Image (cartoon, helix red, strand yellow):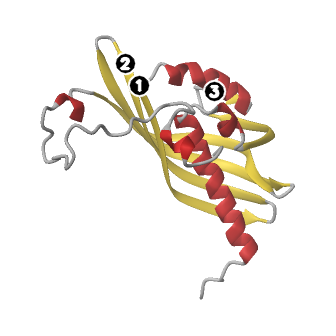
Amino acid sequence: MGVRTPTAAEVAARCAITDVIHRYCRGMDRMDRELTLSCWHPGGTDDHGPLYAGSPEGFVDWLWPVHAAMVVTRHAVSNILIELDGDRAGVETYWNLVLQVPWGDGVYDILAGGRYLDRFECIDDVWAIRHRQSVLDWNRVEPVERTLADFAEPPLIRPARPGIPLADGARDRSDPSYRVLRGA
């Protein structure tokens, strides 16, 4: 039994859905409210288990102060499985998350992995989330004992241009990526 070649419309739908998932991660990590909320259709819902359930706007309102207290947030996605059904789609996306959190006298990395189970719809040629459920598969917390900045000469990494700093990322629109990605 062979695999059917997808139509151009199916490929376009899959690309649009995948773009929404990537925009969500970017919006979360850059704390870009507008970009994050653009991932849902009006009236959409989000269910992050015991953390939050309700509107995307309420989710962002709840989450932003939590994220603002963190040093770093990093969402990464993979294994995006999309089942199209006309102007609807069921989507499972694996996610991995690093949250760097100051706590007590130290800093800790919260590492976690799970899946987004999304119901997408295409309305007026725009694919967006109608409902998202986040599922946690694993997590752990590790103390951050040292970073590369703690080494006068980092092990195995010898700069070809010593003294030139690496561009620092920012968790807002001052991040260097906003100079490359217009409004994304």
Which residue is labeled 2 in the image? 102
On the rendered structure, is 108 left or right of 158?
Answer: right
Residue located at (54% from left, 35% from top): 30
Whether 76 is drawn above or below 8: the answer is above
Q: Are marks 1 and 2 in contact (CB under 8 Å)?
A: yes
Q: Position of residue 85 (x, y in %)?
A: 77, 65
Q: Earlier in the sequence, mark 1 or mark 2?
A: 1
77 to 172, vertically: above or below: below
Q: Quadrant of residue 164?
A: top left
Q: Could you tell me how far apart the alpha carbons at marks 3 and 1 are, in whole angstroms?
A: 22 Å
Taking 129 as reference, is 68 left or right? left
Going by the numbered disc 3, the residue's amino acid type is Tyr
Residue under pointer 1: 71
Q: Earlier in the sequence, mark 2 or mark 3?
A: 3
| Amino acid at dot 2 | Pro
Q: Which numbered disc, 3 or 1, marks the residue that appears first in the sequence?
A: 3
Secondary structure of the residue carrying tag 3 is loop
Question: Between tags 2 and 3, which lies in front?
Answer: 2
Snapshot quadrant of residue 147: top left
Q: Residues within 10 Å of mark 3 (few under 14, many from 20)?
A: some
